[in-house]
Image (cartoon, helix red, strand yellow):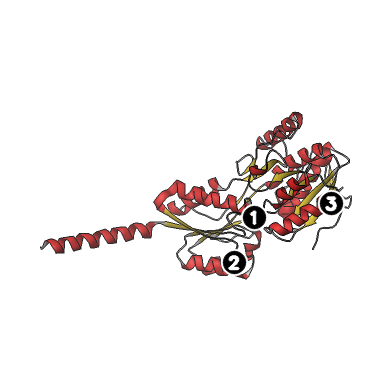
Amino acid sequence: MKLTTLLATAAMALGMATAGVAQDKTKVGFVYVGPVGDGGWTYEHDKGRQAVEAEFGDQVETVFVESVPEGPDSERVMTQMALDGADLIFTTSFGYMDPTINVAKKFPKVKFEHATGYKTAPNVSVYSARFYEGRAVQGHIAGKMTKSNVVGYIGSYPIPEVIRGINSAYIHAKKVNPDVEFKIVWAYTWFDPAKEADAAKVLIEQGADVILQHTDSTAPQAAAQDAGNVITFGQASDMSEYAPMPRVSSIIDNWAPYYIARTKAVMDGSWESVNTWDGIAQGMVEIGEISDAVPADVKEEALAMKAAMADGSYHPFTGPLNKQDGSDWLAEGETADDGTLAGMNFYVEGLDGEIPQ
């Protein structure tokens, strides 16, 4: 055989081997509601994506689409990912729930993972974090540190996840400060820096000297910094560029271990539909460093509460607690069940205002 023929044969074999390797890669897609640079929710999900790449190297290929509106457009994006060969797709916002289910029906061999939702299918898992545990810590610090006794809360959408957080923060602020009141502004967005900044300014004008947020940008931190003498908490990521003031601590969403485990399950064939709801104990919820702007005794109390939630000796929703209308909810020592928390659609006693419908 001529040398040129041998070289051509070798090249062809190498090409086929390379193609085989490429085909063996597990392709993982991520659909994001905000930009990867939002400094909060999407930023942390993308850190999880990068952790998958770091863990598996050239065994995986990851792709993402950012700033995808909830609704029909997200369905189009998911469909295109599946058509492009994704083996696993993470859809990372509550409003992607029905689109995820719809697309999963069309692509039964593709595995889907939906964040913060509750609808599953044979090829759809759901996962979320017990953010309300972090809100308990924030509420404790807020109740201890407010001088005006007014705490402002920026809500995104009136869904159970957000309502749980408001209730948890309020319960724990009220425990340490009976005079505290919460003022809530609904932004009706996950990420819109201008709207979030305006909401923070409105709350500050109403006397709030503590701002909590369930929206994704750092705009409320900046608004508080401009106002002076207002404290804030990082949402979803540490937002430590605003420490030690106004940001005195944060809730950090650590998605990396989950994303690595679920990608591995697809790779080794063990993936199955599951419902995961993890918190501080499992490391999915982390409490960012509590800055020196917080008095030492308050910091010690907050860390003790975190430790108690981690070892299971304390539950943020422990009675006696009533609903907003004064009706009984939890008796002395009774803790809320996951079903009630997952569908929470009421405020606890003491909160003013109605939940928008």
Q: Which residue is mark 3?
A: 205
Q: Which residue is mark 1?
A: 116
Residue for point 59% across, 49% down = 44
Identify residue type, mark 1: Thr
- Alpha-carbon distance for marks 1 and 3? 33 Å
Q: Quarter holding the N terminus?
A: bottom left
The CA span between labels 3 and 2 is: 37 Å
Secondary structure at badge 3 equals: helix
Q: Is residue 95 left or right of residue 274?
A: right
Q: Which mark is residue 74?
A: 2
| Residue 203 screen position, x and y as percent | 81, 52
Q: Is residue 318 left or right of residue 237?
A: right
Q: Are marks 2 and 1 in contact (CB under 8 Å)?
A: no
Q: Residue at x 86, y 51 (%)?
A: 206
Q: Residue at x 73, y 56 (%)?
A: 196
State the CA–CA distance, disc 2 to disc 1. 16 Å
